Amino acid sequence: MAFDLITIPCLKDNYAYVLRDHASGEVAVIDVPEAAPIKAALAQHGWTLTQVWLTHHHWDHVDGLADLLAEHPAKVVGASADAHRLPDLDIAVAEGDRVALGSLEAEILDVSGHTVGHIAFYVPGAAACFTADSLMALGCGRLFEGSPAQMWGSMQKLMALPAATTICSGHEYTASNAKFALTVDPENAALISRAKDIETARAKGIPTVPTKLSTELATNPFLRPADPGIRATLGMPTASDADVFAEIRKRKDTF
Ligand code: ZN
Ligand code: FE
């Protein structure tokens, strides 16, 4: 592999990720819930941080930034649409923009829904996408700002990535997501089996992220509104995918 990708548990149930390009030695951290665990990981590997990629403005994704930058000066990349409510950006980006990390390159996707202005960083050279609170392991982010139709549009963008893409999401919510998923897709054998694996992993304190897009396509109800089994469970055999997605999101809000 021409890169390293490490997962860093932060706060109670957040994740940051560190991506390092071997060719250049450039290192990016994706989201900064808190500084200490990220500093510790950089020190452990002897890596020099060069970039910070922010997915959205929520405090649990940016609060450690000032503390981290004080020790590790780096260029901060975030959404131009959210520049007014993000920490100071060195590089403001929008959908379609590209950000180089040495020999790797991130493509920016607008994945609004959880917030309007939430972006994902898709890195084809690492076959990874940093989705934070848009697409999550067995779930998707709560709709604080966007509409269900907007979030469904964001899900469709992510569904179009290569199925082998590693999905790096922002929280350890997978066990409760699995319980909900089983209520709308109870006969999905892949989901039943994944739910057991998640229980086992969590009992050992092992993170359930990152995951693969192929796994999400097979088990994540938020990517499966077209599925006849889910539609039967919801009593929505002929509704649009967007309407089925909206119903799944609504049920999850009160689960
Ligand atoms: Zn958030
Ligand atoms: Fe979050």
Image: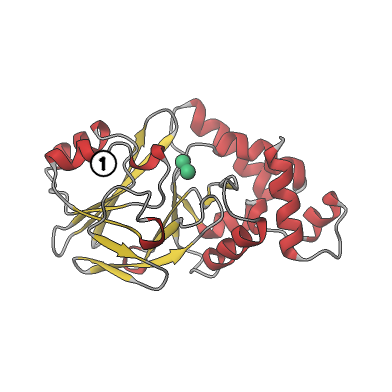
Question: Does 187 sit left or right of 40 as displayed?
Answer: right
Compared to residue 186, the image places residue 163 above or below, namely: below
Colour scheme: secondary structure
Question: Does 138 sit left or right of 226 as displayed?
Answer: left
Q: Is mark 1 within 8 Å of ligand 2?
A: no
Name which residue lies at 40% across and 73% down. Answer: 96
Q: Nearer the viewer, residue 99 or 123?
A: 99
Residue 88: x %, y % from top left: 26, 51
Q: Could you say whether the residue bearing mark 1 is in a helix, strand or loop?
A: helix
Specify few, some or many for label 1: CA neighbours under 10 Å numbering under 14, 14-19, or 20 or more.
some
Compared to residue 40, the image places residue 47 above or below, namely: below
Q: Nearer the viewer, residue 53 or 219?
A: 53
Could you tell me which quadrant the N terminus lies in?
A: bottom left
Name which residue lies at 31% across and 41% down. Answer: 32
Residue type for callout 1: Leu
Query: What residue sits right under mark 1 in the picture?
Result: 65
Could you tell me which quadrant the C terminus lies in?
A: top right
Count of number-bearing discs: 1
Residue 228: x %, y % from top left: 80, 60
Question: Does 125 sit left or right of 235 as displayed?
Answer: left
Q: Nearer the viewer, residue 201 or 249?
A: 249
Residue 182: x %, y % from top left: 72, 41
Would you identify the image quadrant in which residue 92 lies? bottom left
Name which residue lies at 34% across and 51% down. Answer: 54
Residue 81: x %, y % from top left: 41, 61
